[in-house]
């Protein structure tokens, strides 16, 4: 009885959280509970016409409103290229998510571990810390996303050996060689899932005179997108506005066309991978040859991308189970074993 009471009291005052604050989605992990939130990083804001704005919806509900709002209501993605583009809206979004997952911990100010891209500046890092602090967090620790993805994929980052991790999120692609709790070498570009969606959007307008929304482009990518020729051609309908007739319409689109549409951003991703391999020290290169490449993030789900990377690098490429969850699992592991893993956090 006393043990149960002690465990209950301990749980009340131990509500630390870890967050993958992504361009496309925000995921949160609560200590001793696991992953408790996975929602789009979208906020719906209304304006009363007198210069005052009000948050109408955040997350899944806000995404449903995107492109379907009236003039006094707009949907915003406050994260751009993996970093904070709108500080005030991001602060409101983080506060909402923290309150949502910690509704039973009203009087607790949690510690937070946040995954960030390797390419962000000191100013952008400070913006993440400030946003979390204003949301009621007592202390914030940052972990670079490829390191978090490596930990979440089960890679032994503590060993003195090199492992190459490629994390393709919504806003950035991070390529990093991990060794001994640190990133020995890294490259990053702001070309990732969003750029693939925009490439599809441009292709549909130029080749089919069809104006589609960004989330429709994302849906088409998920339905038939691939980075490598598929054995069986997939088809889906793309729905939007015919720019010639001004009439809503739908056309059939296949996987070969979508692969052609995404060719340029995919080539940029392959280029940054080859650049990272070229600049990796010889001893770490030998380890990578033995261990292969680990591909994580939403981009890992793109059909045939692992095969294209293998063909381009001559290195075995592995995709972990549920690659979308690699970062949040990694920052969650850091949170659960903070005294041991805090050395992976950056200043």
Image: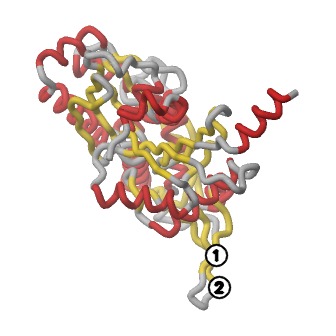
For residue 238, side relative to residue 54 (left or right) = left
What SS does tag 1 mark? strand
Report the label total.
2
> Up-down: is 147 above or below 28?
above
Give x and y (percent) for residue 273: 24, 30
Among the 4 quarters of the image, the one containing residue 310: top left
Q: Looking at the figure, which quarter contains the N terminus?
A: top right
Which is nearer the eye, 67 or 286? 286
Residue drawn 46% across and 64% down?
Answer: 244
Which color mode does the image show? secondary structure
Which is nearer the eye, 275 or 264? 275
Residue tagged by mark 2?
48
Can residue 247 be seen here? The reply is no
Can residue 298 be seen here? The reply is yes
Give x and y (percent) for residue 49: 61, 88
Residue drawn 28% across and 47% down?
Answer: 119
Residue drawn 19% across and 18% down?
Answer: 284
Image mark for residue 257:
none
For residue 295, side relative to residue 240 (left or right) = left
For residue 200, side relative to residue 119 (left or right) = right
Give x and y (percent) for residue 38: 61, 42
Residue drawn 43% across and 56% down?
Answer: 129
Residue tagged by mark 1?
54
> Up-down: is 183 above or below 164?
below
**How many other residues sit within 10 Å of disc 2, few (<14), some (14-19) or many (≥20)?**
few
> Up-down: is 60 above or below 312?
below
Are the residues tagged 1 and 2 within 8 Å (C-beta)? Answer: yes
For residue 234, side relative to residue 195 (left or right) = right
Disc 1 and disc 2: Cα gap in Å? 8 Å
From this viewpoint, which residue is outermost toward the top?
290
Q: Earlier in the sequence, mark 1 or mark 2?
A: 2
């Amino acid at each position: 009885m006393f043990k149960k009471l002690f465990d209950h009291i301990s749980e009340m005052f131990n509500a630390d959280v870890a967050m993958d604050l992504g361009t496309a989605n925000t995921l949160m992990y609560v200590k001793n509970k696991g992953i408790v939130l996975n929602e789009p990083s979208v906020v719906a804001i209304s304006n009363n016409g007198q210069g005052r704005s009000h948050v109408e919806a955040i997350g899944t509900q806000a995404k449903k409103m995107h492109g379907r709002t009236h003039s006094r209501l707009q949907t915003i993605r406050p994260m751009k290229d993996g970093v904070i583009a709108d500080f005030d809206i991001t602060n409101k979004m983080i506060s909402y998510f923290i309150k949502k997952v910690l509704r039973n911990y009203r009087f607790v100010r949690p510690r937070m571990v946040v995954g960030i891209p390797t390419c962000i500046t000191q100013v952008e890092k400070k913006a993440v810390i400030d946003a979390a602090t204003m949301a009621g967090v007592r202390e914030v620790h940052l972990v670079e996303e490829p390191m978090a993805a490596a930990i979440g994929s089960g890679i032994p980052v503590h060993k003195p050996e090199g492992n190459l991790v490629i994390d393709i999120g919504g806003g950035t692609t991070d390529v990093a060689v991990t060794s001994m709790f640190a990133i020995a070498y890294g490259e990053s570009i702001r070309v990732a899932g969003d750029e693939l969606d925009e490439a599809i959007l441009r292709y549909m307008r130029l080749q089919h005179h069809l104006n589609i929304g960004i989330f429709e482009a994302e849906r088409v990518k998920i339905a038939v997108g691939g980075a490598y020729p598929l054995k069986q051609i997939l088809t889906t309908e793309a729905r939007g506005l015919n720019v010639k007739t001004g009439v809503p319409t739908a056309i059939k689109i296949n996987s070969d066309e979508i692969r052609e549409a995404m060719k340029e951003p995919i080539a940029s991703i392959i280029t940054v991978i080859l650049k990272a391999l070229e600049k990796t020290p010889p001893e770490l290169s030998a380890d990578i040859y033995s261990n292969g490449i680990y591909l994580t993030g939403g981009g890992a789900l793109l059909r045939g991308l692992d095969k294209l990377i293998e063909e381009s690098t001559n290195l075995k490429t592995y995709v972990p189970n549920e690659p979308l969850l690699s970062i949040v699992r990694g920052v969650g592991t850091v949170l659960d074993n903070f005294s041991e893993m805090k050395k992976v956090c950056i200043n």
